[in-house]
Image (cartoon, helix red, strand yellow):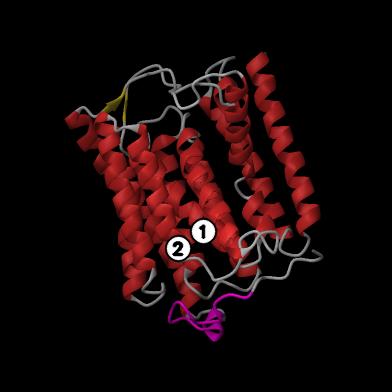
Amino acid sequence: MGALRPAPGLPPGEGGSISGEELLPGGPMTWLAAGVPLGVFIATLWLTGVVLGWLRRKAILDHPIERSSHRIAVPRGGGIAVMAVLVATWLALLAAGTLAPVMAVLVGISVALALLSWRDDLGGLPILLRLLAHIAAVVLGLALLPETKIFSDLLPFWLDRIAAGLLWVWFINLFNFMDGIDGITGVETAALGLGTALVLALAGFADDGTAVMALSVGAAGAAFLGWNWHPAKLILGDVGSVPLGYVLGWLLLHLAGRGLWAPALILPLYYLADASLTMAWRILRSEPFWQAHRRHLYQRALARDGNHAAVTRIVAAGDSALTALALLAVSRPYLALALAVAVVAAMLLLMERRARS
């Protein structure tokens, strides 16, 4: 494959009421792109504080366990506020015709995953039940993707969809696994949401409402950082990390389905690398990889001083570079991907250096 060519997808205006002409300065998309993220940011910042007070009164706390990196109990369930604001925003976008009516399915699945995950936060659910729920959510969500191949022409369509589904299930779970220190998920959510929107805009696909949806997710992640930066006042919980992983996974597959496979790989590359390498290492050591642990590089990087903020800043800096490279990948996919691998390698080396010092 030579220079990246966006794959055929929905023509301008399909999937929403916004047409290409309305992308001009001052048009509806301009106002949506500015107003929706700002509204989501303010609402999430406020509602998270309200939810925090309720969690404290109900004593819903995340007590230190083998997987966590906290030394004291912290309220768990900040994802209630994040998802409440996002779902309300998406429903408003659906009502306005900005999102295609079929996207109501994605919103409904996200709500179902949030409710199931909240039940898991409160008392724990069997791993098999959670995995089956993730698989069912992915199977339904695959029908909402563009009728194009995710992995270019490498696989026949039916196998392409199976591979995409397996990757999506893994992404949901790795996004949850990586939510182990203060600020890291807020940073990653903000980067993936903003990065996806910018790539869609640069590639000329910002007129189907997906970019605004991605911006809303990024804004919610950024707002949550106000409460979750080290030392965190509360944590997201599975009620937030699981549905966020689901929606962000869909957005990334949507990019790939548009022919933007390189940006879709580059944007989450650090999370993919840390989680996948850790999983492979544990399997090779015959460890029970399904159990909670602190083997991820970002967790081991706390060994020296327990400074969550220092580790999260590495992730933030790396994500910023990956976002820039994802934009470059719209026109120069192979160059951008090679540089992205170098960036992630540097991030992992910095983590390992902290872990050993």
Badge 1 is on which residue?
Answer: 251
Front residue of 149 and 249: 149
Front residue of 120 and 49: 120
Provide residue 105's location: percent of width, then percent of height. 35, 64
Q: What element does badge 2 sit on?
A: helix
Q: Residue at x 55, y 48 (%)?
A: 167
Depth check, mark 2 against mark 1: the one in front is 1
Q: Residue at x 34, y 66 (%)?
A: 104
Label 2 or label 1, whichever comes before in sequence order: 2
Badge 2 is on which residue?
Answer: 213
Pointer 1: residues within 10 angstroms few (<14), some, or many (20+)? many
Q: Is residue 304 magenta?
A: no
Amino acid type, label 1: Leu
Camera sees residue 273: yes
Provide residue 187's location: percent of width, then percent of height. 52, 42
Q: Are marks 2 and 1 in contact (CB under 8 Å)?
A: yes
Provide residue 228's location: percent of width, then percent of height. 41, 35
What secondary structure characterizes most of the magenta part?
loop
Q: Is residue 15 magenta?
A: yes
Magenta span? 8-23
The quarter of the rendered structure image containing the C terminus is: top right
Front residue of 247 and 8: 8
Quarter of the rendering containing residue 72 = top left
Total residue callouts = 2
